Amino acid sequence: MTTVDLVRYNHAVRELYLDALSRLTWAEVVSFKGLSFDSARNVFLHLTLVEDRWINYIIPNRFSEWKDPDFDAYKNIDALKRYADSTKASTEKFLSNLKAEDWNQKVTLPWPNYKPNTQVTVETVLNHMVLENMIHYGELSALLWQLNQEAPYLAYCRYKFNSENKL
């Protein structure tokens, strides 16, 4: 498994969760559920913005330009899809431009709860980004089960070795 495979697998999983959320009423998607970010919409936005923030702001050292989105501005599934698609496109562009030496490029973590100038590699950032998303997919699965809905499941090997996927 390569890190690029893992990032693309994350995109496939995110699409499945967006599809699962689209089968709920919008009122259900935005209602308070006591999740890490209150509602399913907010959890989905958070896991998408994690990728957006790392790829477009932290790695290129532009974190000072980052503005948290107004979650309430996302008023339907189509708005969530547009953000997810835009983020995926940015990430694909980033991945396509990565050279071998870029994987070990140092990225400074911008948050004050780390020691000043804490650095990790681009490869570490990408793996962390996917792992954080997986935590939130589990959260969305639990919510879907509580609503008597089927939660999506896509094993990595099924994704990776399905002849329809072109990695």
Image (spheres, rainbow, N blue to C red):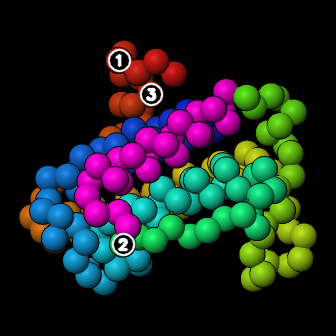
Residue farthest to the front?
73
Specify the quadrant of the image occupied by residue 134. bottom left
Q: Which residue is mark 1?
A: 164
Q: What's the mark number on residue 160?
A: 3
Q: Choose between 41 and 144: the one closer to the eye.
A: 41
**Does 105 sit above or below residue 26?**
above
What's the residue type where badge 2 is placed? Asp
**Does 115 sit above or below residue 52?**
below
Q: Where is residue 63 drawn, in percent x and y?
A: 74, 63
**How many angstroms separate mark 3 from mark 2 (CA)?**
35 Å
**How many angstroms separate mark 1 from mark 3 (CA)?**
9 Å
Judging from the image, what secondary structure is the residue with disc 1 in?
loop
Question: What residue is at 86 percent from the left and 68 percent from the top?
Answer: 118
**Earlier-in-chain disc, 1 versus 2:** 2
Question: What residue is at 76 percent from the left and 52 percent from the top?
Answer: 59
Residue farthest to the right?
117
Judging from the image, what secondary structure is the residue with disc 3 in?
helix
Q: What's the mark number on residue 72?
A: 2
> Can residue 78 be seen by looking at this rendering?
yes
What's the residue type where badge 1 is placed? Glu
Q: Where is residue 53 drawn, in percent x and y?
A: 63, 58
- Figure label count: 3
Specify the quadrant of the image occupied by residue 32. bottom left
Question: What residue is at 59 percent from the left and 40 percent from the top?
Answer: 90
Q: What's the mark number on residue 132?
A: none
Q: Where is residue 94 drawn, in percent x and y?
A: 67, 36
**How many angstroms separate mark 1 from mark 2 (CA)?**
36 Å
Mark nearest the camera among 3 and 2 is: 2
Badge 1: residue crowd in 10 Å (few <14, some 14–19, many ≥20): few
Decide: marks 3, 2 in contact (CB < 8 A)? no
Badge 2: residue crowd in 10 Å (few <14, some 14–19, many ≥20): few
